Image (spheres, rainbow, N blue to C red):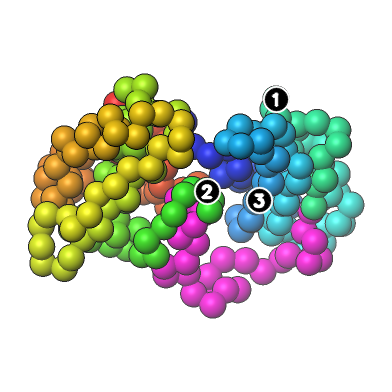
Amino acid sequence: ELMPLPILLAHRLARTLAEYRRSGAAPWLRPDSKTQVSVLYEGDTPLGVTDVLVSTQHAAETDREVIRSFVATTLVPRALDGWYHDDLRILVNPTGSFTQGGPSADAGVTGRKIIVDSYGGMGRHGGGAFSGKDPSKVDRSGAYFGRFVARQVVRQGLARRAEVQVAYAIGVAEPVSVKVDTFGTGDSRAAAAFVRTFDFRPGAVIERLDLLRPIYRQTTNYGHFGKEGLPWEQD
């Protein structure tokens, strides 16, 4: 998926939780949930998972021990797969009962969760939300194309890790700045030269990724990146 491990595993936990709810295997589960995974790194190499947090909405009558046991013995081992180990610290609904969820229990959702929509804090973020905007807004299309180009840098073998930064001025098609950071994992000059071959103008981005299609339902949960089938995830 070419994604940071913490956000990859957090999304996997959320997806697996939803699978159990939809299948009826855990009928007390409700739609709202939050997941978080902490990973120990040496440099840029993940060594192992240290902590997992799962907060899940549930039916009011559900015993807390039922929830804790399900998360610790069923959900987490399945979702983490090879990253699971017996010394994990697993936190389950640490604030207690979680029976009210969704927009009615929150202070609004527009523009929220921009970090979990992207890279879980592993990559820098310009601050603009993605959802609710058409692709003429570079908050959205620029982030998608940055992802597309960064993937190409890695796929071409120019670096093991890459982050593309692009800045725009309102009303100006050409970006005012395009930069790639390879974090010491490759040939930074070759990567920079490669990135300069791409056309970052918004119209060109929309055309290259074909962003005017109705494809955005896939981005309403589990983030906007690392998903097969989305045009910015193609080689």
Instruction: Give the alpha-carbon distance from disc 2 to disc 1, as whole Å.
Output: 22 Å
Residue under label 1: 82
Residue under label 3: 36
Instruction: Give the alpha-carbon distance from disc 3 to disc 1, as whole Å.
Output: 17 Å
Task: Please identify, in this view, whether the residue under mark 2 or under mark 3 is nearer the observer.
Answer: 2
Q: Are marks 2 and 3 in contact (CB under 8 Å)?
A: no
Highlighted magenta segment, given as a residue range: 92-118
- x, y percentage for residue 208? 16, 38
- Between residues 140 and 197, which one lies in front from this camera angle? 197
SS of the residue under disc 3: strand
Mark 2 vs mark 1: which is more N-terminal? 1
Q: Residue at x 61, y 58 (%)?
A: 32
Mark 2 crowd level (few <14, some 14–19, many ≥20, 10 Å Cα): few
Q: Is residue 29 left or right of residue 67?
A: left
Give the overall secondary structure of the magenta segment.
loop
102 falls in the magenta region:
yes
Mark 1 crowd level (few <14, some 14–19, many ≥20, 10 Å Cα): few
- x, y percentage for residue 158? 35, 26
Mark 3 vs mark 1: which is more N-terminal? 3
Does 226 sit above or below residue 175?
above
Does 189 sit above or below residue 66?
above
**Looking at the rendering, which quadrant does residue 110 occupy?**
bottom left
Identify residue type, mark 2: Met
158 falls in the magenta region:
no
Residue under label 2: 122
